Image (cartoon, coloured by chain):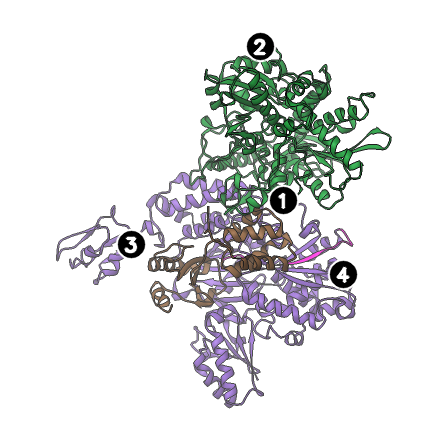
Amino acid sequence: MCGNKIKLKEADYNKIKEICEKFGNNPGELINVLHQTQGHFGYLPIEVQEAVAANLGIPVNRVYGVVSFYSFFTMKPKGKYAISLCLGTACYVKGAEKILDALKNELKIEVGEVTADGKFSIDVLRCVGACGLAPVMTIGDKTYGHMTPEKVKQVLAEY
Amino acid sequence: MANIKLTIDNKVVEVPQGTTILKAARQMGIEIPTLCNFELEGLALKNHPGGCRVCMVEVAGRRNLAPACVTECMPDMVVKTNSLRAINARRTVLELMLSDHPNDCLQCAKSGKCELQTLAARMGIREIPYKGEQSSYKIQVSPSIVRDMSKCIMCRRCESVCYEYQSVGAIGAVDRGFPAVVSTAFDRNLLDTSCVFCGQCVAVCPVGALTENDHTGRLIKDLNNPDKVTVVQVAPAVRVALGEEFGMEPGSIVTGKLAAALKALGFDYVFDTDWGADATIMEEGHELLDRLTKYLAGDKNVKIPLMTSCCPAWVNFYEKHYPHLSGYPSSAKSPQQMFGALAKTYFADKINTKREDMICVSVMPCIAKKYEVERDEFKTNGNPDVDYSISTRELARLIKLCNIDFDALEPVDFDSPLGESTGAAVIFGATGGVMEAAVRTAYAVLTDGKLPKIDFQEIRGLEGIREATVHVKDGLDLRLAIVYGLANARKMLEMIDKGECPYHAIEVMACPGGCIDGAGQPYHHGDASIVRARWEATYKADRDMPIRMSHENPSIQTTYKEFLGAPLSEKAHHLLHTHYFDKKTKIESVK
Amino acid sequence: MHILVCGGTGCSASGSREVIAQLNKELEAHNLTDFARVVVTGCFGFCERGPIVKIIPDNTFYTKVKPEDAKEIVEEHIIKGRKVQRLLYVAPDTNKSVSDSKHMEFYKKQVRIALRNCGFIDPENIDESIARDGYAALGKCLFEMTPQQVIEEIKKSGLRGRGGGGFPTGLKWEIASKSRVGEKKYVVCNADEGDPGAFMDRSLLEGDPHSILEAMAICGYCIGSDHGLIYIRAEYPLAIHRLQVAIKQAEEVGLLGQDILGSGFNFTIELRYGAGAFVCGEETALIHSMEGHRGEPTFKPPFPAQSGYLKQPTNVNNVETFANIPVIINKGADWFASIGSEKSKGTKVFALAGKINNVGLIEVPMGITLREIIYEIGGGIKGGKKFKAVQTGGPSGGCLTEKHLDTPVDYDTLIAAGSMMGSGGMIVMDEDDCMVSIAKFYLGFTVEESCGKCTPCRVGNKRLLEILTKITEGKGTMQDLDDLRNLATVIKDTALCGLGQTSPNPVLSTMSNFWDEYVEHVTEKKCRAGQCKALKQYIIDPALCKGCTACARACPVSAISGTVKNPHVIDQSKCIKCGTCYEKCKFGAISIK
């Protein structure tokens, strides 16, 4: 079983109910509902998916089928500072893989994982549309361009 | 619709507009291989995702190959099903599929019945050039169904059945790309999902990814244990299907050989679930009369319509999906469980055997029955009324294993007393049968037996939702509905929920055409004519019976006289009726 | 005066937000807020030199502006009218600074139709859009033309879908307009830009959202629809924000909503968010996704025009296609058709990136040659390296080489050359790029993005990737190359949707254009670009080695042997190619082969 087990509080259930109601409890709005739910909880643990399914009146299998299909949805919490490394073509030809190796080395985690202290997580994504600055990585809202393996340490030190 | 002409493999063919290349070719005797494509014509099961790509053919003027299963014929189309390009493509696609398949055919439960294996043999696959990572999943066992997703080829038949046909949604595609597979939410055991164990996913799975939980090994041990008294019961639909496993024509009625085979296997008592079915009619029929009388007298609290409760998948469905409506289904147990309850009390007393020393086995066309026997409410001091249930297919395997020449067996009768039955019980195997059996008895009671009517043609048929009105007497027309497929049952429940249901009674069966196409029956591989043949055989078997109304079964009459008293008596209630649970909240709170 | 500052994603990432804040501060400090105004615009295209600041009316084009430059720009240029020379673009060929973008090589050959407003207007101000003919085409359609006349005009213009397929847009609209007349229909804008090297749709939406809204309304008028949906990547927060603002503004002034401009025509637009699935660029998958399902494509027919969103007739076009519509209506089909090549009319926006001097967003007339794009607009290969290949069409496209440089770029010639137009990613590669690795990179993408529905794409692409990986690890055989080709051909022939059918293109095109490199990897276990780590060999030159033992001490697997003051040797069977020795050697004695 993937994902973490958590206990939802009453307020959490109400929040999910509120989001679903905002979309008229319409199963056709499942993806919008999941976007907002993930926006609220930071990720989509099992209990949240179950609550969404119950509110929309659809099988939880369908919710999980959708969550596991789209790369934007995650069942694992991210680090306080979520690092996203662009692996688009422009970044790739300019050595993004080396940046990734440096990040993994520095943080001792793999892609999709969170450091033990919960501070950083690494994800890869395809093209942030800043090809002029390749290779690019983002931490939260901040974009770092023209990355080099050496710069990784410096950037991480900012946090 | 207008006809169009096209050329397939150099021959001209004329087909109605909208026909697929696959069907047009089939009409000419050209069998294009398929895997994901599936349709039980006229019986509501279908799956046409166009995803497996083993039916690719060459269409002149087209850039790429066309999937024959979903590509419609066009006027003057020129199709090549056997060009080098098409054959190479189909073979490569199959090799790819096999490159992500365990290929452990020798140990596979589906060996010999596997559509992928058949296809590989037909295409003469001798090696798989593409090697690489293989999908690997843990084998998951539930009371009815064993899931080995390492064998899944993503044909999605099971998903279509689970979502479209049954409206259950327990299994569906998860993940994407290479790891994509049909699974439960969070890879949970089916027990912790909305699954109702109808097993139709098993019935349609082309490979060994979904199979029944096999109890043949356990049965052989029990049959060879001298300390145990073994009692077997056989469901109505088994006798019209088992012959297929031994090369007989679909629709062969093998009741006598079946009884003989069970004796040859070494059962001490070979009985018939039909006897339990007659008991069911006594109880359920009287419950209907009771509710109806109150309803007609203006009682607002009585639950009308009465819904049948013989089908264990259907019982699971309302417990898991509509627990608030579980007052509508009859409280009567299913024939299997009535039989078990009486076998381990009434009959056990007769032969001076303790229930713990008796092994009661059922042979069922169904695999939801495997779940049903394990229900706690059907146990006394932990000892189940029915110890376990095997499917028609398992029985066939056992007969073969024990070197019994089925064809050569001399037909014999079931043992007495739990082997005597009526035509009303036989038709339990087909959709509408339970209703007709109940109506035969109810009609006789309501008309004081003055105007016997046996054949209620208006109740029979193979459509998924049927309505019938039976005129009983002036001022009393019984309004009935008969449905199969739980998506259809859902429609009925929705109607009841809204207070818009016009019927007095509704029969529900989960499987297409009723138990004759239960998930434990021999595989039909999408051939609807097999199911129709079983259906026709069921009514023939009814006609051939000397007694055709349940309340006229002498053995049943004796049982009431000696043991139960009257239908709906306190004892009958205790042994032959059950209660339902809210399992919806339970699933939703699985953490 | 207007100070235009690029607020696109590229320049924002380079710090344009800070520049904007600083400029505003300076204007305030000098009490110039009535005289000069900072306008945050969409992408100028020249992302390489961002953040870009442009002064209007004199068209001065400042590059790589930093917040600390704001003071000088205001005090020198705005107050005194003197250009800040050090911030001007310096042409690499002449070494002279160029102040007006019109004279820059990067812009000279560009023709901006779709991008006409990007970098000129404040995308969050509808008035600026209207001042540049925004919604004029919609008005013209509603009051002067019948839907059929509009469709005829689009057909005559020769506009083809810019999302990759190149289907004639006018024809698509006509089919949708004739489908199930009178029933509810939908207009869908596909803004799920998924090509990992393309960002034109994003720039368009960020820089000129109103053109897209206008075009969707025109489409609605033509096909008989009153509702539009924009399916946009959730990873594009700025574009989403600008669209939300634009929709609100257009509704407020009556250019969207009920009874538009009093014409009786109603049209509303809502946003739907993608969630990271490349396959949703395929229109049937996109529709399933909008309906809240897994984005799996289905067999066509039925086409969306017959049965699309919620089973109703639906017309799907991509962002750039829509961006061309208002101009065609305003300037006429003949004008549009006069631009471009015989079968591909108008212009195409490309995201030019990779090993090229001028990375950025460009719009060029169809029929321009790759040489013009790479050497004139793109300013040639970075660092004076040798050009090797240019990849177009993203994961669906192929690599073109030296011999294709003079091929005119349009839909048909690119396909003939073994690639495709795609959505417009154009990645330039130099001699340091290994073509087997590039094919592997794209396959890695496809494998991750495959929906898993059909066997050839789900299993076939995985196997292609595995074979490619084997080759880059030096374990490939000639049989693997045969298998690779057969498998790629079959996948193309049998996959269910456009993603699968085109996914082998990067393999097939590199195999046909760089066959030698594949063979070298297999037979000589050599990667000429030095990119395949497993094929690298670190070698100590005995003539240069001083025997200092630094390398031997640093080697994590003790693969280096030798005695002090004597040349050392690397045991290739033990070496894990980590490169530590290479970094440790102070005498340059270690080389990579």
Circle 3 Cα neighbour tier, 10 Å, few/some/many (<14 / 14–19 / ≥20): some
Mark 1 or 4, which is nearer the eye? 1
Residue B122 % position (x, y)? 54, 27
- The amino acid at mark 3 is Cys
- Disc 3 from disc 1: Cα separation: 48 Å
Q: Residues within 10 Å of mark 4 (few under 14, many from 20)?
A: many
Residue at (15, 52) in percent of width and height: C562
Quick check: can you spot residue B480? no
Q: What is the CA distance from the residue labelled 4 to the residue labelled 2?
A: 78 Å
Q: Majority secondary structure of the magenta segment? A: loop
In the rendered view, tell whether residue B330 sits above or below residue C104. Answer: above
Residue C186 included in the magenta stretch of the image: yes
Binning the other alpha carbons within 10 Å of mark 2 as few (below 14), some (14 to 19) or many (20 upward) gives few
Chain that bears disc 4: C
Front-lying residue, B392 or B416: B416
In the rendering, at what x and y percent does residue C219 appear? 70, 61
Q: Quadrant of residue C132?
A: bottom right
Indicate the secondary structure of the residue bearing disc 3: loop
Same chain for the residues under marks 4 and 2 in the image: no
Mark 4, residue position: C147
The residue tagged 2 is B408
Identify the hue of chain C: purple
Q: Nearer the viewer, mark 1 or mark 2?
A: 2
Q: Which chain is green?
A: B
Which residue is labeled 1 in the image?
C299
Q: Which chain is brown?
A: A
